[in-house]
Image (cartoon, coloured by chain):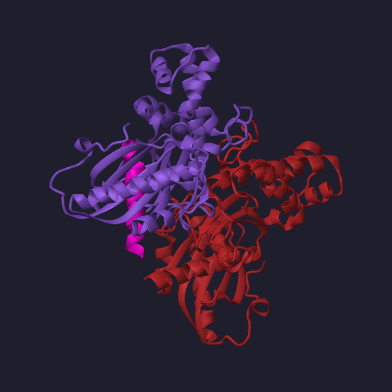
Chain colours: A red, B purple
Amino acid sequence: MTDSATPGAGTANGDRTGDVVIALDVGGTGMKCALVRPDGRTLHTERHHTRAERGPEAVAASILDVAEGLAGKARANGLIPVAVGLAVPGVVDETTGRAVWSANLGFRDVPLREMVGTRLGLPAALGHDVRVGGIAEARLGAGQGTRHVLFLAIGTGIAAAHVVDGSAFAGAHGAAGELGHVVVRPDGPPCGCGRLGCLEAVASAASVGRRYTALTGIPATAAEVVARAVGGEQNATQVWRETIDALADGLTIAQALYDTEVVVLGGGLAEAGADLLDPLGTALRQRLTFQTEPRLLRAALGDEAGCLGAALLALDALNTT
Amino acid sequence: MTDSATPGAGTANGDRTGDVVIALDVGGTGMKCALVRPDGRTLHTERHHTRAERGPEAVAASILDVAEGLAGKARANGLIPVAVGLAVPGVVDETTGRAVWSANLGFRDVPLREMVGTRLGLPAALGHDVRVGGIAEARLGAGQGTRHVLFLAIGTGIAAAHVVDGSAFAGAHGAAGELGHVVVRPDGPPCGCGRLGCLEAVASAASVGRRYTALTGIPATAAEVVARAVGGEQNATQVWRETIDALADGLTIAQALYDTEVVVLGGGLAEAGADLLDPLGTALRQRLTFQTEPRLLRAALGDEAGCLGAALLALDALNTT
C-alpha cells in the first residue's frame, strides 16, 4: 500500500469522459479508493494509509482530503464526479449517514455522509463496509443472478451481509448481520465484544492463528495453519476442523433465519479456497434438516468489493433522490 | 370451535356495503376465517374444523368450499369480495403461491393460490401463517409505528417473522425466520426436525409441559407450569428458568442477525404476559453487548393475527397488480 495513486494498475483507457462516482472503503489500516463508472467499471484506483492512531478527527479529515483529491483527479481527466460513496466498519446507520460506532477508527456518532457531501458539493452515501461489499458481490460478483445472498466476510473479525434483490439489510440500528457475534461455543475463547465463544472468537482468520499458537506455541497465520492442515499436521488439522465446525454451526443458524440461495465467502480466510469451501459444504449439509442447502461460493471481487459497493450505494442514492 | 358461522360475535353493523377480502388461516386443528375490510376492520368471523386426518386433498377441498361459502355470505350481505387471502403453516413459497411442505396438513407442493383464485374467480394470495401474523402485528397490532419488527410465535412449535416496513421476509425457499430450529442446547432434547436442542424442543409451549412432566411425572400444560413457577414450586421454577434462558439465547441470536426495534411475542406461551416478558427482558439484557436492546411486547391481535395478515397479503397483491 502506498499513499500515492497507482494509475498504471487502475486507470483504463477509452473512458476519459462521462460520469464517475468517487468511492472510498476506509479500514483500520488502509483506505481503498476508486473512481467508478455508473455501470460498475473501475477507472482508477488508489490506496492510502488510514493512520488510525492519529484519532477520529484526523481520520475524518483525511477521508475528506482524499475524496476531494479524487474529485480533482476525475475533473483533470475530463470526467464528471456525480456522487461520493463511503464505506466504514463498525455500526453504521445508512439512513442518517452516521458512523455510530467503530472500534478500529474511533468514530462515535460522526455524521460522515453530511461532512463529505458538504465538502465535495456532491450527493453522498455512507455504508457499512461488509454490507456494501455484500451489495457488490451480489450485483457484480459471485452472487450475480441470485436474489437472496449472504455475504460472509472472514478476516480479522467476522461479519455478514444479508442481501435481497441487491440491497443489504442494515437493521433498525445499523447492526444487522453480526453473525460473528453469535455464540457457537458457550465455553469457548473470549470475544472482543465481552462474551465467550462468539463465532468470531473461534473462526476468524485472527482466531485461527491465535488458537494454533495457543496449542503449539508456534506463531502462525491462518493461511499457514490451513497449509499445515492440508499437509496432514495433527495440531493444524485439529484447529482447522474446529474452525470448519464453528463456521458450519454459524451458517446453519444464518440459513435458518435468512434462507438464502447462495453464501459468498470473502475476507482473508476465503483465500483458502476449496480447502475452506469443500469441508464447510460437507459440514453444513450434515447440519441442515428440512432447510434447503445454500450454494457456497468464493467471493469474486477480492478486496475491491467494499470500494465498488460504496460506489453502488452512492449511485442508488442518486437514483432515488 | 364450531363448523358454523358466529355472526353474533363477528359481524359489525354499519358496514353492509363495499369491498371485503375473504381471509382464511388454516391450522392443523382449525380454520379461522373472516371477511375483512380494506382498512383492516373485521366484519364477520367464522371457524371450522380442519380435520387434517382426512388427508391433504380433502383439506384443500374444504378450504375451497369454505372460501366460496364466505364469498357467498359477503354477497348476500351486499358486500363485494375483491380478493382472497390464505395462510398455512410449514414451508410456503409466497412468490409461486405454493404450499411447499406442511407436516400438519400433509401438503406437498400444492398450488393453493391458483386453486383458490380459480375457484372464486378472484385475485388470491398465499402466505405463511407466522409471517402473515407478523405482518398483521407489525401494521395493526403491537408493532404499529415501528419499522423493524420480529414476531415470535411460541405455541406447539416456535417460528418467527422478520418484518420490515410491513413486509415479511420469506427467504429464497419460503423458510426464513425458523428461529425455532436454531440449536441452543447442543445436548438438549430431540427436536421434530431431527436435531438435538433446537429452541423449539426446549422452549415451545408443548416442550415446557413435556419437560415438566419428564421431571416430575405430573402431566401439565405450559400455563400450569408458569402458574406453579410463579407460586414458587421448585421443579416448575427450574423448567421455567431454563425456558427463559433458552428463549433469551434465541432472541440474542435473532437480534445479532436482524437488529429489530421490537420483538412481539405471540402464540400460547405469550399468554403468560409479564411472567414471560419481565424475566425474558432481563435475561436478554444480560446477553447483549454492543447491540441495541429491542423492546419486548406482547402480541395485541391474539389468534386473529393470521387471518388479518392473510387479508393484508391479499390486499397487497391487489394493489401491486
Compared to B171, does A234 lie above or below? above
Left or right: A125 with respect to A280?
left
Residues in magenta?
B299-321
Left or right: B140 with respect to A46?
left
Compared to A90, does B296 lie above or below? above
Residue that appears at 50% across and 75% down:
A21
The front one of B228 and B89 is B89
The front one of A12 and B34 is B34
Residue that appears at 51% across and 69% down:
A312
Examine the structure image and report whether residue A215 is included in the region drawn in magenta. Answer: no
Image x and y of residue A10, in percent: 64, 77
Residue that appears at 26% across and 50% down:
B72
Which quarter of the rendering shows the N terminus of chain B?
top left
Q: Quadrant of residue A245?
A: top right
Image x and y of residue A153, in percent: 62, 54
The front one of B30 and A187 is B30
Compared to B115, does B197 lie above or below? above
Q: For residue A59, say whether it is visible.
A: no
Which quarter of the rendering shows the C terminus of chain B?
bottom left
Image x and y of residue A261, in percent: 59, 56
Left or right: A188 with respect to B231?
right
Task: Assign the magenta stretch its main secondary structure.
Answer: helix
